[in-house]
Image (spheres, rainbow, N blue to C red):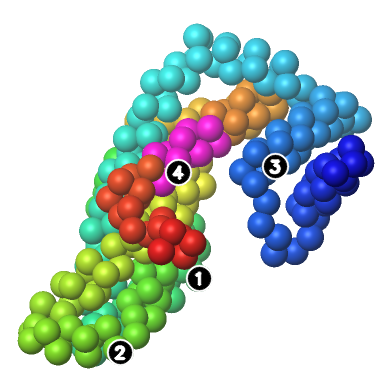
Amino acid sequence: MSPAAPTGQRFKGWLDVLRPNEVVSPTAMQIVVVVQVAMALVIWWTSPWAVLPKPNEVFTAMGRLWMQEGLGQELITSFFMNVEALLITAVISLGLAYLSVLPAVRPIVGAIAKGRFLGLSGLTFIFTLVVGGGHPLKISLLVFGMTVFFVTSMASVVASIPKSAFDHARTLRLTEWQAVWDVVILGTSDQAIEVFRQNAAIGWMMLTMVEGISRSEGGVGALLLNQNKHFHLAEVFAIQLLILTVGLLQDFAIGIGKRLLCPWAHITLERI
């Protein structure tokens, strides 16, 4: 084979990343990601907008916030509040989604799913009257904001279970509730974790608004609003970057948990 052939093949391989539905190697994808991140940093650093803080200003602001403004403690406060709301959301949403196999529960699940069109600003007063202020108010707002989307996604997963799966369970002489356990709960466990993973990010997205409503416990949301109020853009970018980093680590951890708990979900057709 001539020396030009391997070069041509490598060039064709790089062009595969620009073709739809092409399968590329993990190494090629890693290089693509590194190149895109580098390009984003160059564009950020050379940005002509004077109001946009440079990367060095952002990291300097992050160090100052961490050492002088208690950013680490505020992050811990927000993280555990977010985890608490997420666990409550998972219990409520999964329970409602699994019970949607009952015809009497389906209208309730449908009504809750429609709640995703409601704005939380108009519901804050109602939640305040019901649960009071402070920590319970923030948890209730986070739970509501995540539950309406979690229920929508998970109810769709349950509704998409083929009838043949239940018929197969009946041939094994399982009762209807045993079929629900085997087909609905165990059979969709990998998809439930994926829905949990997708909706976990909503809590961080809502954090600023919720912690801005009640600032008694602090949190990165309250700190972010304070910095934004005084137009400290470097500090605002630093807090946003930290929230993004923690969110990505959380998403990665949930993905690892899914691989450990549901390894069959990652078996490809080629391995079968």
Please state, as top left, top right, bottom left or bottom right, where the C terminus lies in the image: bottom left
Task: Identify whether 245 is placed above or below 254.
Answer: above
Task: Using the image as rendered, state which of residue 92 and residue 230 is in the foreground.
Answer: 92
The CA distance from mark 2 to mark 1 is 31 Å
Numbered range of the magenta stretch: 243-255
Mark 1 lies on residue: 117
Q: Residue at x 46, y 35 (%)?
A: 249
Mark 3 and 2 residues: CB-CB less than 8 Å, in contact? no
- Residue 28 disc label: 3
Location of residue 182 (image quadrant): bottom left
Q: Amino acid at mark 3?
A: Ala
Mark 2 lies on residue: 163
Magenta highlight on residue 252: yes
Task: Using the image as rendered, state which of residue 53 and residue 219 is in the foreground.
Answer: 53
Q: Which of pointers 2 and 1 lies earlier in the amino acid sequence?
A: 1
- The answer to whether residue 51 shows anywhere in this view is no
